[in-house]
Image: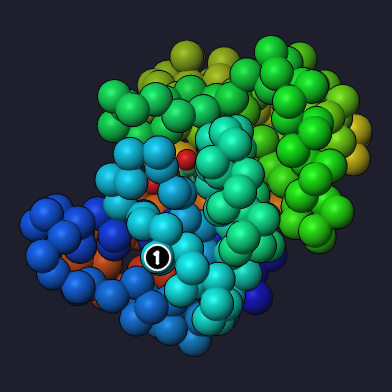
Amino acid sequence: MTKIRLGVNIDHIATLRQVRGCTTDYPDLREAVKILAKQHVDQITIHLREDRRHIQEEDVKLLCEERLLPINLEMAASEEMEAMVLKYQPDWVCFVPEKREELTTEGGLDVAKQEGKLAKLVATFRRHNIRSSMFIEPSLSQVQSCKNIAADAVEFHTGKWVLLKNEEKMQEWKKLEEAALAANQLGLNVHAGHGLDYQTTKEITKLPHLKEVNIGHAIICYSVFEGLETVVKKMQAILSR
Ligand code: PXP
């Protein structure tokens, strides 16, 4: 158990499997989940993208059936994904923006622009005991919109803050801090993720009211040399401080 919950995003393990045109059945996601469960990671995060570039529907099915750890499904707010959620019943859903041409999730979701649609989805999922978080930029108006649609949590996009330097980085940190304080004040759980490595994970633990981080790329990359178990233990130690 860590002070701040750790969700491990295993999309990039699926990327390695898919990269040979689906001709290999390794690396096996279930092997990864076994290691993560043994280390008492708090949840598995997976993103079923419209273009199926990494996670496949079959993965969602198997991981939700086995459920060695709670499942956080990242998804676009589409009818197709709503049907997937109702079919496989993950524990959490994280709404993300999605563009086919992007390398990874670029920028946060504009919740303010689609409050009606998102409020309906959040309410539907809640009736099935599935909680919802919104992957947003650290903006006060987006936080307020998350409250308006009765989301359970906000996940702040840390990708920009991770890449910025000096004064600009400090400005972005201020936005993260203000947004985290506002979210907590409104009763929303504060989560964060994107681009976090050992160093920035250490720094993000100082974000007020932070309850959960979701980390993928760095954990899988570090694991090539260090092994998944070791990397997860190191991240958990950072999050326990
Ligand atoms: N959280 C969300 C909502 C994401 O879309 C991603 C990327 O899939 C992550 C966290 C993890 O980001 P990274 O792989 O850069 O650690």
Task: Say whether residue 38 is left or right of residue 192.
Answer: left
Q: Return the residue nearer the eye: 119 or 92.
A: 119
**Numbered marks: total:** 1
Task: Say whether residue 138 is left or right of residue 108.
Answer: right
118 in relation to 236, above or below: above
188 in relation to 233, above or below: above
Q: Check mark 1 vs ligand 1: CB closer than 8 Å? yes or no.
A: no
User: Residue 223: image x %, image y %?
Assistant: 26, 67
Quadrant of image for the N terminus: bottom right
Q: Quadrant of residue 233?
A: bottom left
Q: How is the image coloured?
A: rainbow
Q: Return the residue nearer the eye: 37 or 132.
A: 132
Task: Say whether residue 153 is left or right of residue 213.
Answer: right
User: Residue 166: image x %, image y %?
Assistant: 42, 19
Quadrant of image for the C terminus: bottom right
Task: Say whether residue 90 is left or right of residue 200.
Answer: right
Q: Ligand 1 sits in which quadrant?
A: top left
The residue located at (40%, 38%) in the rendering is 50
Q: Is residue 206 visible?
A: no
Q: Quadrant of residue 81?
A: top right
Q: Return the residue nearer the eye: 113 or 184.
A: 113
The residue located at (49%, 86%) in the rendering is 38
Q: 10 Å neighbourhood of mark 1: few (<14), some, or many (≥20)?
A: few
User: Residue 4: image x %, image y %?
Assistant: 66, 59
The residue located at (86%, 36%) in the rendering is 150
Under circle 1, the secondary element is: helix
Q: Give the residue type that dot 1 points to.
A: Glu
User: Residue 215: image x %, image y %?
Assistant: 46, 53
Name the residue that disc number 1 marks: 58
